[in-house]
Amino acid sequence: MQVREAEFGSRIHEYDNVLYLCHRNADPDAIGSGFALQQAFGGDLGAVDGISKAGSCLSECIGGDIIIDPSPEGYDFVVVMDTAVGLQIGNPVLGGYAVVDHHRDEDLIEGATFYIQRPVDSTAEIVWRILVENGIEISRNMALGLLAGIITDTGRFKHARVGSFQVVAEVLDSCDVEYGDALDILSREPTNVSRRIAILKAARRAKIDWIDDWIVATSKVSSFESSSAMSLMSLGADVAFVGGRHGDVCRISGRARRRAVLAGLDLAAILRSVGKAHDGDGGGHKGAAALEAVGSLAKLLAECKNKVLEVLEGR
Ligand SMILES: [Mn+2]
């Protein structure tokens, strides 16, 4: 059942022992959002598998105490943060749970006790509304976490819509925090050598296809798929898919320029259908999405690429 932001407090207070659970490789949006709710309403903060570089940088700066791979059975209730697809939290067996998320997928909300899902640019924007409407006093660290989430999920406002600017203005106006403080935290992330090598390899191995004036790049790396896809886009691709093999599964990260999304491209839909067709799943946003599936990485990449070319042809 979808509930209003104002109802979150009374619903969550029905439970004594709550876990705020972030997705795999948790990013600043998941960490900042989970941290703010945990500070506001009590409970524990956890993440599946581990935290991304930027996520752990943020967590360190705001004093987050994150349990890696917590067992949900130990809690009365779980709030799944910034996650729409069960696969992203390793498909655990959950008793009662809620979802607070900004993706469009329906996988997890179907079984949820309640959920707040709105297609805004970041989960942090929804959490801000929850805090305000429940009359929570917002600390500087809570505000910093939410700002970091909005900044990263909008690609530093490159894909931001008016709602994210509005929330940022409200945060800066009502909390003891400067915009530059949040930027400082995010720039503390060390420029990781293995990440830069992965990106350069993705560029060297890229296959390039085009139709009309749309350019689609596909490539393979063993990690840092999403950074690599983003970099291929900044090198000139309109759409980029970068995949990697992780044990038995392949992960593919896709990114599309805004003009491709405006032309009708929906990467979340494409990656969901390719994922589901190969014993996996996928989802995300129209311009940034991911899948996990079983099979040949080259074939999966080709299938994604062909679907994109079909959509963009003649647009
Ligand atoms: Mn997010």
Image (cartoon, rainbow, N blue to C red):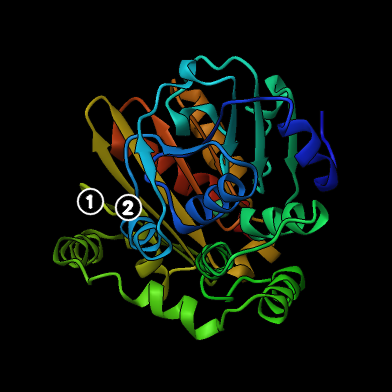
From the viewer's perspective, tell me whether residue 76 is left or right of residue 55: right
User: Residue at (53%, 72%) from the top-left corner?
Assistant: 213
Of residues 50 and 290, the one drawn nearer to the viewer in this rendering: 50
From the viewer's perspective, tell me whether residue 90 is left or right of residue 312: left
Disc 2 marks which residue?
A: 225
Find residue 128 and report its horizontal and vertical position in percent.
70, 59
Figure check: 185 above or below 205: below
Residue type, numbered disc 2: Glu
SS category of the residue bearing label 1: loop
Find residue 60 and report its horizontal and vertical position in percent.
34, 60
Of residues 140 and 299, the one drawn nearer to the viewer in this rendering: 140
User: Residue at (65%, 75%) from the top-left corner?
Assistant: 175
User: Residue at (32%, 46%) from the top-left corner?
Assistant: 243
Q: Looking at the rendering, in which quadrant would you find the N terminus?
A: top right
Q: Looking at the rendering, in which quadrant would you find the C terminus?
A: bottom right
For label 2, count other residues whose C-alpha is less than 10 Å away and answer few (under 14), some (14-19) or many (20+): many
Q: Residue 31: in sight, yes or no?
A: yes
Disc 1 marks which residue?
A: 221
SS category of the residue bearing label 2: helix
Q: Are marks 1 and 2 in contact (CB under 8 Å)?
A: yes
